[in-house]
Amino acid sequence: MSAIANTKAITPPDVRARKGGTPLVCLTAYTTPVARLVDPHCDVVLVGDSVGMVLHGMPSTLGVTVEMMIMHGKAVRRGLEQALMVVDMPFGSYEESPEQAFRNAARVMAETGCSAVKLEGGETMTETIRFLAARGVPVMGHVGLTPQAVNTFGGYRVQGRGGDAERIGRDALAVAEAGAFAVVLEKVPDALARRITGEVAIPTIGIGASAACDGQILVVDDMLGLFGDFQPKFVKRYAELGQFAGAAITAYAQEVRERRFPAAEHVFADAPKGAHATESGEAA
Ligand code: KIV
């Protein structure tokens, strides 16, 4: 066993120290190849419970389990060298008590090798965040629109446009005071996100919030144009990979039907007499 930690890797204290500095670049990832793609460019890679909707076709994040987060977390771990890896605690795995949260967070950290967890909720979660942070579990908070509470909110509407603006501000402050190293602000008005960013001592990471936040996060499949079920206003599509993939699959289907694939360069000739097969099974 090696006792040498990866000294290149970004840590929760490194992220905490970026308050007010160069904006933190954060994306989600759920698989090894995507983790490899985003790692060189990101400060934080989140294995979000959005995986349930994005990769598993679930209607919300509520059906995501600890086992799913561990499976995707392990895959992402294999693709990261430098970004801080954070794994979402899924619905039902932390709300009951600080002890329940610790048990599941410790399992997620031990089995995936992530350095921190994220959990949703403000003032109601402060006891849990304090409990975890004091026991070696760095916590990223998440306030504003918290998708696991979709049934309580009655949808995915912008939060903090009315009387609840004060509550969201208090939530962010409470999460910071409880010991979170950063907090996601989701789908709140620009002015509120700016105000909260100025008030809390930890970095705010915006999604549908404000350019004034200390960092930004997007779901990687959204910004690559791979997730087409719906497109929230706050998503900028930096590519249309879904369209590229559709065109490629159409071309493949046509070539197969017309017997144009496989072509001569994709098939194997008989082995010349006396030749030995290589390890890959191809004739030398
Ligand atoms: O699950 C997720 O992907 C998230 C981010 C979008 C913040 O919580």
Image (cartoon, helix red, strand yellow):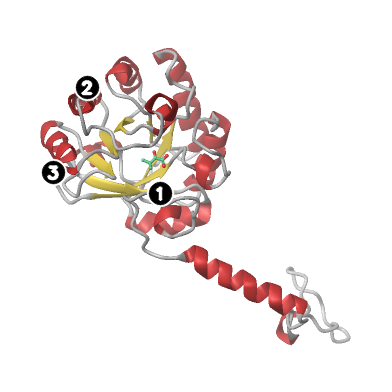
Q: Which of these two is toward me, 75 or 245?
A: 245
Q: Position of residue 83 (x, y in %)?
A: 35, 48
Residue beneath disc 2 = 174
**Residue 276 placement: quadrant:** bottom right
Query: Does ligand 1 reach within 8 Å of label 1's beta carbon?
Result: yes
- SS for dot 2: helix
Q: For residue 20, which numbered disc appears in the image?
A: 3
Q: Is 215 displayed left or right of 232 in the figure?
A: left
Q: Residues within 10 Å of mark 1 (few under 14, many from 20)?
A: many
Using the numbered discs, state the Cα–Cα distance from disc 2 to disc 1 in whole angstroms: 26 Å
Amino acid bearing label 3: Gly
Q: Which of disc 1 and disc 3 is earlier in sequence? A: 3
Above or below residue 95? Residue 172 is below
Residue beneath disc 1 = 219
Using the numbered discs, state the Cα–Cα distance from disc 3 to disc 2 in whole angstroms: 19 Å
Q: Position of residue 282 (x, y in %)?
A: 76, 75
